[in-house]
């Protein structure tokens, strides 16, 4: 959904955008702000963790509970109910399920199991992104929302081919929404790595990239056995490597199919009207 000029965008009585960029750059902050100003907020990660991976997550809770005899007896007799309380602001159930590969004694997962869960996430993320048109229609038909923002995870770029206009996810998103890259700086990237260490988020690696970085991390740290890898150490190191690998691909997606808003400019947005103005600027900037 590329516009001829900002006037074409402004003349549209309804607006639908998909924001993308590195995890923690401000996508959810913006989406929450717009939701308070009458926009429908569609969280891709929330959709993944409820509709598309909810059963995996809850089964994992039950698997752990079954290790405790007291809880196991109650589960078998249907005396207790276990569920996931995932929210837009708390993705811990999804993060916990995806886990991190490494030493099981330090909370890690066997690499093979981690890869299985990664593939589950890939399929779920694609499905959640393809759900966007349905939710645009649903938001208006059920709740009367005219404006819509899809808040994607940082791994959007991992499950698409940004060079292929016929990629099903790219085609769906560009036909129904304007793609908006929230672009951070190198300083933002360093801060995101620091924040990730304190509060890890769900991570998805392309299969080949995961193996490359896994072997590289082991070599750098003199570790031969997969189960001797420090899960927390790999998670932080892998996040930094993944983040910097994604940046040029985010830019390529925006160059081909969308618009760019600088993360620093989000501070100027206090309302839906401010965001519309910022979008107008982004449209003009692309035309230049």
Image: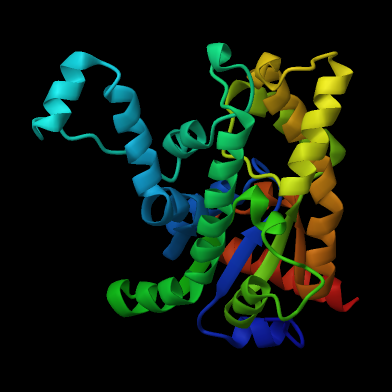
Q: Is residue 9 above or below residue 230?
A: below
Q: Residue at x 63, y 31 (%)?
A: 111
Left or right placement of residue 71 versus residue 202 in this view:
left
Left or right placement of residue 209 versus residue 144 in this view:
right
Residue 193 drawn at (x, y percent): 73, 29
Q: Residue at x 79, y 66 (%)?
A: 254
Q: Is residue 2 above or below residue 17?
A: below
Along the line of sight, the residue nearer the viewer: 170 or 22 = 170
Q: Quadrant of the N terminus?
A: bottom right
Asked whether residue 78 appears in the rendered view, the answer is yes
Residue 170 drawn at (x, y percent): 67, 73
Q: Is residue 62 above or below residue 56?
A: above
**Of all residues shown, which one is farthest toward the right?**
288
Q: Residue at x 66, y 79 (%)?
A: 171
Residue 230 drawn at (x, y percent): 68, 16
**Res. 122 image quadrant:** bottom right
- How is colour applied across the structure in the image? rainbow
Q: Is residue 50 above or below residue 14?
A: above
Residue 82 drawn at (x, y percent): 23, 34
Q: Quadrant of the C terminus?
A: bottom right
Left or right placement of residue 82 versus residue 194 in this view:
left
Asked whether residue 146 appears in the rendered view, the answer is no
Along the line of sight, the residue nearer the viewer: 207 or 82 = 207
């Amino acid at each position: 959904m590329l516009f001829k000029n900002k006037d074409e965008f402004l003349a549209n009585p309804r607006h639908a955008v998909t924001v993308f960029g590195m995890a923690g750059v401000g996508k959810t902050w913006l989406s929450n702000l717009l939701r308070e100003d009458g926009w429908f907020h569609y969280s891709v990660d929330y959709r993944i963790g409820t509709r598309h991976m909810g059963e995996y997550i809850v089964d994992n809770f039950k698997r752990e509970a079954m290790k405790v005899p007291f809880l196991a007896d109650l589960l078998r007799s249907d005396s207790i109910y276990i569920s996931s309380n995932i929210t837009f602001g708390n993705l811990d159930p999804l993060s916990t399920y995806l886990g991190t590969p490494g030493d099981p004694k330090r909370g890690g997962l066997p690499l093979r199991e981690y890869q299985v869960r990664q593939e589950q996430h890939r399929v779920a993320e694609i499905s959640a992104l393809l759900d966007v048109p349905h939710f645009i229609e649903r938001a208006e038909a059920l709740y009367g929302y005219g404006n819509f923002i899809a808040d994607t995870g940082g791994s959007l770029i991992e499950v698409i081919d940004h060079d292929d206009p016929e990629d099903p996810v790219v085609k769906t998103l560009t036909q129904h929404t304007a793609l908006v890259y929230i672009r951070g700086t190198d300083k933002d990237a360093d801060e995101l790595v620091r924040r990730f260490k304190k509060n890890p988020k769900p991570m998805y690696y392309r299969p080949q990239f995961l193996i490359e970085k896994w072997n590289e991390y082991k070599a750098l740290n003199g570790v031969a056995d997969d189960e001797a890898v420090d899960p927390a150490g790999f998670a932080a190191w892998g996040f930094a490597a993944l983040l910097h690998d994604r940046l040029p691909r985010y830019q390529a997606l925006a160059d081909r199919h969308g618009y760019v808003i600088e993360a620093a400019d989000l501070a100027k947005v206090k309302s839906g009207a401010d965001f519309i103005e910022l979008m107008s600027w982004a449209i003009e900037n692309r035309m230049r």
